[in-house]
Image (cartoon, coloured by chain):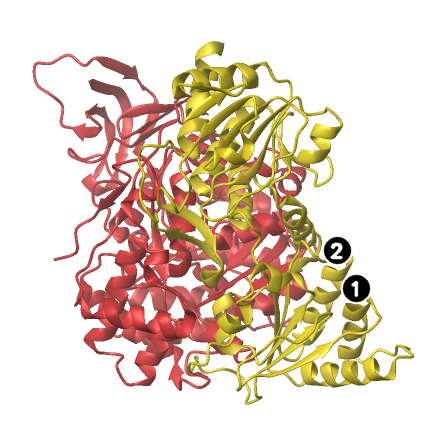
Chain colours: A red, B yellow
Amino acid sequence: MLIQLKGGRVIDPVNKRDAKGDVFIEDGRIVAAPQGREPDEVYDVTGKIVMAGAVDMHSHIAGSNVTLGRQLMPELPYLAAQDGQPISPSPASWGAYATGIRYAEMGYTTVIEPAMIPTHAIEAQVELASIPIIDVAGLAILGNDDYTLELLRDGKGRSDELKDYVAWTLNHSKAIGLKVINAGGSEAFKFNDRTFSLDDEVPEYGVTSRAIVEAMQKAVADLAVPHPPHVHCNNLGIAGNVETAVATIEATQGLPIHFAHIQFYGYGKEGEKGFSSGAATLMDAVNKHKNATVDVGQVMFGQTVTISGDILRQFDGRRAASPKKWAINQGDGNGTGVVPYHYKSKSFVNALQWAIGLEIFLMAEDPWRVLFSTDHPNGALFVRYPEIIHLLMDKDERARWLDDVPEASREFSNLAEISRELTYSEIAVITRGAPAKLMGLNDRGHLGAGAIGDVAVYTEQKNKTKMFAGADYVFKSGELVVRKGKVVRVTYGRCYHVEPGYDPQIKRRVKSFYDSKYGVDPSWFGVSDAITNRRDRFATIPLSR
Amino acid sequence: MATVKGEEAELDSALERAADLLGRARFPVIGGLFTDISGAAAALALAEKLGGAVDHAAGTGLSRASRVMRETGATPASFGEVRNRADTVVVIGKGPLERDPDLIAKLFPGKPGLARPGDNQREVIFLGLDKVRTPRHVRSSSIRGRASLPELVALLAANVRETRFDIRDKALRTKLNRAGERIRKSAFAVFVYDPAEIEEPVMHTVLETVRHLVLTTRAAIMTVAAPGNGDGVNLCSTWTCGLPVRTSFAREVPEHDAWAYETERLLETGEADALVWIDALEGEGTKRPKGAPTVVLSSSPGRASKGDVVIEVASAAGDHDAALYLSPISGIGMVKAGKANKDKPTVAHVLTRIAELIDARNA
């Protein structure tokens, strides 16, 4: 069936398009304007904004870590709704089903779960498969696991064995890329270390965080996995940590690397309170190092819960838990820490965190390398995205919010002086084109012929919060799934992953390691096509070469 | 094989009768739930459609642990971490070894493990039970006395925190002092318990002890897995609707209540007017309660042949591959079928068909 979206303003920066025109969809894909054929369905979208379906490249939506958060905080949607967040007061509101529905309503059609624990990949994948409408992919976590650390300890950091192990893990979890969370820090926590920085050594292994990240960068580059290592640095959330972040960026040696939620690393230690914006310093480094991409991890005021594989940091963060409860799961590899948190506009630190995130977005010289995220749910629930887009596109809106934060927070950030307003095209870059490209999902994030038929149509209005909260239409793989901001058809999407090759010997070695250390056969946690009843659930994306 | 009121029936006809029975019900409960993750997901979907409730046969322990988690959180360690790195393991009560008689052998396998913190010789302290055999390289001691298990836990907790307490039993006091000192000097002490055996205040006492210890050292809890894939079903319930088992879908938003939505209570009081009883795991079985018209999905229907509608289903991990909670990975893993048998329908298939039939009638 040929569908025509007629007469909208088409914003498609990948194809350098920002003009009134038509978009055609047929058999689930975008097609060029067909000659001499009448469309079967025409949607008059005159006066509306037409973009590709949005791609969220860092959002914790599934897996044993997220479900630990649900177990600790079933009341999260109630508390969030009480403070005005756009979420239904029901424990089901952050369940799998509601996740897909709400994302689709906002025009999102692909979401990346950034922290799959390899031994719990089956749960992550089963949960992801129960999320409707959106396509998904997951990043597998390595870097605090003992197999990697043993290889590095034994001087095999640049060996084929590490590369094979990374490849095996990505295949075994059906992941699209590799995540490294506080490299070595979670393991050090298991030896009772409570701080861990870039050049600290993991006890008993003598391996530094720097060495782990470097080894992973090389392995991923050698494997030609499109998405570079997705790194959560050391010292998250600590005043003065901008130095760690800059040092980490400078240590990357020109190889591709992605730094996650860098707002949490944009902290200086100026002023009486020893906490200030380090955004300018951080962005100077990001702007200079063109091998690096980042996502922001914007903070918004309100109740949320933080979920992270950085158990060392989460353990430290437990003292700020609100409500006062926390869970630290000391699991294999990274484990998970869950700490509820309430960001308050009247808090000097929280207001500054909020401002630093916006500064980072607005100081980016190249929006293709500074991507949109809240690190859901850590900085804010994903339902807050429309408000953030509003703040980025409207300096008057920023001024209104700034009026409401403590004067000291304004003083220690540069946000008030920034007049930049992101354009629709830049929003399309940071929420569509750039994340799709960065994940190697080249068939989406744009509206060129051959792209997947994922399209979001919005009614243009001054209030961008309202505009982006509910799309007029959303097409997923060519099917109309949202009309007037509400889901009209529930479909189920696909999971994308990579299949880098490896020497089969690694299977024997990993099996022997798991057997002797854990009494476990790795086949128990391998993700097979059969874990869902949908035959075409999994799809492989090509490697970079 | 299927039966309706004891008479053999074709599968399709049994499914129709099941749909009749459940379609008429005002408040059905889906219980037992000895099933895999697919079966649990289908049960949750059916309960939501019917406005009924879900419970698991091991729901008492699961609900306790869930409530303690909601109230104060938890500090669990994975089985792998305990096996490789704990220097002191405190086994609380008889439940853990009743659930898994080989637990000690699995935790202390006699092979070199991963590097671990500290250099203490490894030790097991049995609290409220006699010593069982431990490998030669592992020390062990037992703390028993006239005190009940909750009292022993409280006394040990007080001792670990060096809080004053009085007991007359000098032998017990000596043992407690020694254990308290050992735990304080441990690099990684782990308390193992079965949530079905100890009540919530006791769990809180253990967790408070761990929260005290982690101020200066490493410590954790480890719970033994519930029978019947209880932990897997509970996780599936949580990611599906945000709440653990013993949840009702009768109102606009799901409601969890460990007392109100217990299967036996719902049947005894007549609050539930229909039961779906699921008992379909290889090597495990559970006894069905009575009290309402029932649809039984069983892999060994001999066990429950008098139900109103009985459908023989494939056993998870016996007749078909199954995603189940596996203790050694402290999470959900895949278990291959012992002997694949595609002739029998799975729990997920049967429940989904019943839901479709009900939909068709309501259309």
Label 2 SS: loop
Looking at the rendering, which quadrant does residue A328 occupy?
bottom right
Where's residue A93, x and y in %? Answer: 55, 37
Image marks 1 and 2: residues in contact by CB distance under 8 Å = yes
Q: From the viewer's perspective, tell me whether residue A242 is left or right of residue A225.
A: right
Q: In the figure, A183 relative to B7: above or below? A: below
Seen from the viewer's position, the closer of residues A157 and A385 is: A157
Kindly state the secondary structure of the residue where label 1 is placed: helix
The amino acid type of the residue labelled 2 equals Glu
Q: Position of residue A67 (x, y in %)?
A: 52, 49
Q: Nearer the viewer, residue A491 or B152?
A: B152
Name the residue nearer the viewer: B277 or B304.
B304
Q: Are marks 1 and 2 on the same chain?
A: yes
> Image height check: is B54 above or below B159?
above
Q: Quadrant of the N terminus of chain A?
A: top left
Residue matched to label 1: B150
- Which one is earlier in the sequence, the residue at label 1 or at label 2? 1
Q: Which mark is residue B199?
A: 2
Going 42% across and 70% down the picture, which residue do you hit? A518
Side of A207 relative to B23 (left or right): left
Chain letter of the residue carrying label 1 = B
